[in-house]
Image (tube, coloured by chain):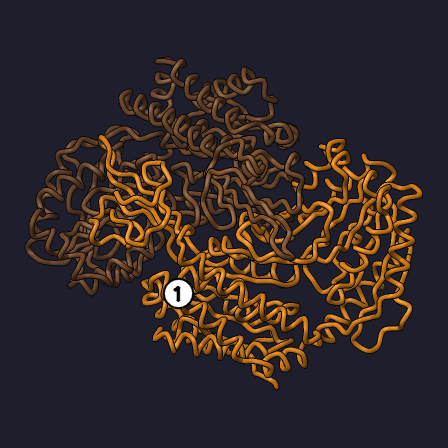
Chain colours: A brown, B orange
């Protein structure tokens, strides 16, 4: 099914409606918002097989994966709903009047309408009812989603589920809207509209950076949280490599090709120190990759981009192709591929740092651990870095640990980067260009913080304060009162 | 004393040194950072009268004010030191392994070297050892201050105090550096240097916006928290105005002229509904202002800008001059001035929304409360808004309360905006153009959040985790473990 791009006039109407709805939605209780989120989760479940079939048709993703992704999306909605109601994210701080100082009380308030750009690779979890939408609703912000054109019908169906939940809750229609747009103009009109107050995005560097620039060039700049991809370097430390070169190869072959490599946490770069253990690892990795069948990619555009970027990467000077899947790829399939290059080549050629979105990884052969450290310092911002290391490896390499911390949002020990736990302790985001603001996450209930700002009330009447700030603590939430965390009333 | 602008080469050396120092400083304990901050506070006190005399000579501010400002600055350093040590700002979240989910643990880590641009109007509290520097040191970030050229010698003396405290603590010299720069080039070189990771600024819209744009145009954009001024609208609601027109006039005359109007929280706009009460208020305000003597401004540039902006504002169509100080201003003095205009004129002429930095305020006469609300919706982002209102006024005007919340960071009831309490519950910042990111504050220990980012550790060995994340909770800080706030070990 084809949907026409929303016009500038339609976007203007939708953003005005979102702004109108904000006046009412911001005043909803935490429970009302949590219930809305839970109703959306129930709606996703109730959509049953039909929704999964649509998504399968549009994304080429297998049924089991999409069913799991829907469960994950429902868990995001319901667990963030619990966090919404618990209210810690309101970050209430109260300082009662003292000496010449007035009573001041602060809480987080919603920033206003949020525009969300869904990802192509997660039609549920990072799209229309995904983490950005869930956290923005928790914050009390109306949401306008631009559905990803690669799964427009899935997005449309999910949008109807959300709109129905909004209507059933008796909330104004403008709390949620959905538009289509395959072109550049729709995105620009959404980001530059005067009533848009923040933007969430998951996708390519080019797309995210364009939104970031438009947002900053507005008369009133607005925050953009864009997650723009990552090559998720994996460092193989000598002790660990010696112990388990073969197991590491098996583990990484699985991670590189999981979901046909179409995860933002796909390990696109593997670094180790030259020697027979690394040779063994490369050999084993190559042999495992050769046995993995090509998979159909999300859509023809992504398959084409993978083929082109892979060809470009493999044709660089001093890049050696280690292994390609033995089975030839069909149309729109991506062939699992491993290449290798020296650290020297890696330092010289920035193209080797670029993401090849799909089942591809480049093994970098360093001369020694000093070169591993140099590489860590050389790599741009990442969502994750993984260290495959024994405890002794870690103790022996404090400089490497420091260097890898600087370039990532999540530091993994002896595990692959694919698989992102939905939990408060998760950080999904990282130094630029992994994301546009390393101070925020797009996974976990802390993602709510992207859509709120502090508002302080000074010398206000207790009866007229928001409930979260009232003396009696009617919401029974944790608050910092005169620098002490407490649930006690004042 | 004249100081030459730092050259690009000098800035490169300083930023490289800051980056080097970051490696060691980030590993310091919270207690070490807190002790450094306390030592700086002691150093400020030990500098005694000499420092005050220098600041008096450079800023024309009176002795008592500067002594109080130094006490405030010391309180910032010591109270933020206490917050640093208490560690709540680390926002530790731990989710232990469960089913197929790995153990993940997150804390806030320092973002890297921070460049601070001091304000002209607070030579201590918002300058070299001010809130930006204090919060960045608490976070574990090296600081490079560009001293304000209007009080370069004061800044130099304070910088020596900080550098001595750094040396006495045995920390690397690069933890703190101080440069001079009256020109555009110094600021640009600092903001665009590859090792600069964040920027703090207090000053004009033009200055702050330039830094923001440079920072966003970098290859790796960095966050800028710029506080860029505000006209701090004060809304006079009918019930309150009827009760106490005269008292309000006295209160506001004091606030408009406090410190010769050179506060970012100066009330530059007062709005009320036409009628005899507003006439009385205007009359009383004018008569109070007429009796207040002109004060010497911070430096000739500010006095000149005040004179020019005041002249421009008063010469606008439909702007009436209500009162000017009876005593004529001497050279570099600012004459207290009150003007008035209709809401209609205010809506038509954006120049009337602009800050006239100094002892000036514009009273807007609205036809009715609908026009008050319209004005509230029309005004750009502000640090504060004040409502002078009885409880009934508030109950009768929910739309106005909603509208004023949208445009400010701090909402004040029946008090003037001047006077910013240093407390965790303070919000000093607001929607653009009051600041470049409404999600952060520059006053209160929450200001630390500007200079940190979350880092998650996955499946890490307990012994090798940062202390804040270890099972035993050796720092005895509040942590969110499996979604529950606790100080218990795991």
* Residue to which mark 1 is pinned: B33
Q: Nearer the viewer, residue B331 or A8?
A: B331
Q: Residues within 10 Å of mark 1 (few under 14, many from 20)?
A: many
A228 up-or-down from A475: above or below? below
Residue under the image location 68 percent in, 36 percent down: B402
> Image quadrant of residue B14?
bottom left
Q: Nearer the viewer, residue A456 or A437?
A: A456
The image shows residue A123 at horizontal and vertical percentages of: 39, 27
Q: On the picture, is A479 further left or further right than B275?
A: left
The C terminus of chain A, quarter of image: top right
B99 up-or-down from A244: above or below? above
Residue under the image location 51 percent in, 22 percent down: A3
Q: On the picture, is A88 further left or further right than B152?
A: left
B213 up-or-down from A44: above or below? below
Residue under the image location 55 percent in, 35 percent down: A472
**Would residue A392 be visible to someone looking at this image?**
yes
Q: Nearer the viewer, residue A100 or A192?
A: A100
Q: How many marks?
A: 1
Q: On the picture, is B22 further left or further right than A341?
A: right
The image shows residue B167 at horizontal and vertical percentages of: 39, 78
> Image quadrant of residue A401?
bottom left
The image shows residue B370 at horizontal and vertical percentages of: 81, 34
Q: On the picture, is B239 further left or further right than B30?
A: right
């Amino acid at each position: 099914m084809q949907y026409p791009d929303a016009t500038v006039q339609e976007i203007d109407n939708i953003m005005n409606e979102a702004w109108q709805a904000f006046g009412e939605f911001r005043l909803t209780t935490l429970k009302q918002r949590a219930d809305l989120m839970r109703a959306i989760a129930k709606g996703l479940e109730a959509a049953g097989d039909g929704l999964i079939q649509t998504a399968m048709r549009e994304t080429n993703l297998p049924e089991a994966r999409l069913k799991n992704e829907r469960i994950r999306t429902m868990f995001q909605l319901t667990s963030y709903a619990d966090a919404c109601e618990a209210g810690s994210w309101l970050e209430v701080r109260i300082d009662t009047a003292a000496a010449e100082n007035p009573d001041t009380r602060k809480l987080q308030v919603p920033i206003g309408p949020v525009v969300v750009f869904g990802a192509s690779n997660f039609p549920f979890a990072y799209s229309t009812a995904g983490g950005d939408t869930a956290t923005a609703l928790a914050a009390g912000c109306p949401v306008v989603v631009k559905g990803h054109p690669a799964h427009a019908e899935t997005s449309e169906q999910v949008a109807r589920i959300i709109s129905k939940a909004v209507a059933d809750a008796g909330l104004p229609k403008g709390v949620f809207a959905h538009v289509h747009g395959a072109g550049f103009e729709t995105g620009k009109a959404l980001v530059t509209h005067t009533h848009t107050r923040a933007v969430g995005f998951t996708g390519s560097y080019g797309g995210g950076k364009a939104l970031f620039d438009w947002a900053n060039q507005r008369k009133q700049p607005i925050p953009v949280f864009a997650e723009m991809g990552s090559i998720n370097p994996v460092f193989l430390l000598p002790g660990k490599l010696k112990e388990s070169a073969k197991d590491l190869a098996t583990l990484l072959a699985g991670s590189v090709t999981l979901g046909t490599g179409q995860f933002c946490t796909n390990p696109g770069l593997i670094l180790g120190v030259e020697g027979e253990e690394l040779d063994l690892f490369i050999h084993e990795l190559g042999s495992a990759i050769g046995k993995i069948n090509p998979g159909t990619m999300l859509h023809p555009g992504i398959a084409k981009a993978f083929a082109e970027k892979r060809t470009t990467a493999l044709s660089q000077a001093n890049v050696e192709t280690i292994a390609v899947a033995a089975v030839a790829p069909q149309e729109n399939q991506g062939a699992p591929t491993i290449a290798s290059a020296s650290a020297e080549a890696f330092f010289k050629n920035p193209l080797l740092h670029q993401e090849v979105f799909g089942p591809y990884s480049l093994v970098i052969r360093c001369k020694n651990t000093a070169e591993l450290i140099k590489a860590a310092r050389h790599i741009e911002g990442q969502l994750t870095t993984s260290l495959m290391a024994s405890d002794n490896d870690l103790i022996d390499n404090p400089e490497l640990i420091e260097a890898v911390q600087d370039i990532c949002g999540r530091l993994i020990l002896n595990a692959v980067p694919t698989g992102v736990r939905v939990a408060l302790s998760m950080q999904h985001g990282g130094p630029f260009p992994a994301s546009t603001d390393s101070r925020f996450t797009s996974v976990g209930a802390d993602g709510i913080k992207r859509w709120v700002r502090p508002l302080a009330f000074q010398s206000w009447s207790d009866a007229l304060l928001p409930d979260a700030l009232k003396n009696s603590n009617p919401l029974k939430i944790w608050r910092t009162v005169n620098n002490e965390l407490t649930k006690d009333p004042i």
